[in-house]
Amino acid sequence: MTTISRHFFGDSDEAVFSISIVENMKEDYGLFVWPCSIVLADYVWQQRLRFSGGNVVELGAGTCLPGLIAAKIGSNVTLTDDANRLEVLENMRTVCELNKLKCEVLGLTWGVWDASIFSLHPKIILGADVLYDARAFDDLFATVTFLLQSNPGSVFITTYHNRSGHHLIEFLMVKWGLKCVKLLDGFSLLPSEKAARLSGNIQLAEIVLSHEQIEETSSSGAR
């Protein structure tokens, strides 16, 4: 069954605007607003001055709430999801139209090096609950690392359920030459009324290239 949920953003008790999302839990896990998306979207709103005017790419966007907030506050946004999930990509276009927001919708499969990934030049990469399937972790981090290397100074901001401890993320970062520069408890970012409606142990991490990776990338480019 298809429903439309509304998500409100603002300062204190006053809502400034809302975003409407088309959801269908029975069809696909990419067509439901998961708690990690709500946390990341609120963080984007809180950091709106940082996002305004910048190029933003959301990976595994699904219902794309964080990316839509970025678009609402003035970012140039590309929403991406697996190129094979046509129903999710179509839902992303529908949600953009519903909210009267202009975003590019792009099929991007992690770990696949086709024309789509070379067209992206983000300042900020977003990913909400993209760390749910261990089989996809290396493909995800390969994609993230490529985008960070290709766009000096960029950052990957992700929210995830801390199911097995942050050490798993640390292992992946070391493997791919990345480092965490900020780690926050997700619920501490939310207004109390939003936090009360969610459950789980959600963390938010900001991830960048390690110094070693930056030096290696710079050396490669100089050759």
Image (spheres, helix red, strand yellow):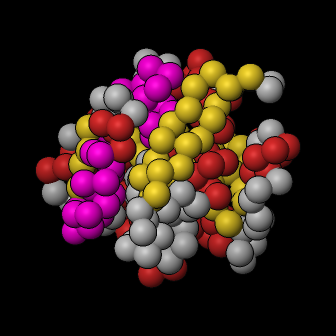
User: Can you say which quadrant of the picture contains the N terminus?
Assistant: bottom left
Residue at x 16% of width, y 57% of height: 114
Whole-percent x, y for residue 166 in the image: 73, 66
Q: Nearer the viewer, residue 4 or 71?
A: 4
User: Can you say which quadrant of the picture contains the C terminus?
Assistant: top left
Q: Residue furthest left?
A: 115
Whole-percent x, y for residue 28 in the image: 39, 72
Q: Is residue 145 magenta?
A: no
Q: Residue furthest bottom?
A: 135
Is residue 196 toward the left or the right of residue 5 in the image? right
Whole-percent x, y for residue 88 in the image: 31, 60
Whole-percent x, y for residue 103 in the image: 31, 34
Q: Nearer the viewer, residue 12 or 203?
A: 12
Look at the image and tell me whether residue 53 can be seen: yes
Residue at x 36% of width, y 44% of height: 95
Name the image quarter holding residue 43.
Answer: top right
Residue at x 27% of width, y 55% of height: 89
Above/below status of 109 relative to 73? below
Q: Nearer the viewer, residue 178 or 42?
A: 42
Is residue 88 toward the left or the right of residue 64 in the image? left
Above/below status of 90 relative to 135? above
Residue at x 35% of width, y 29% of height: 101
Q: Which residues are magenta?
A: 67-94
Look at the image and tell me whether residue 178 can be seen: no
Is residue 96 toward the left or the right of residue 72 in the image? left
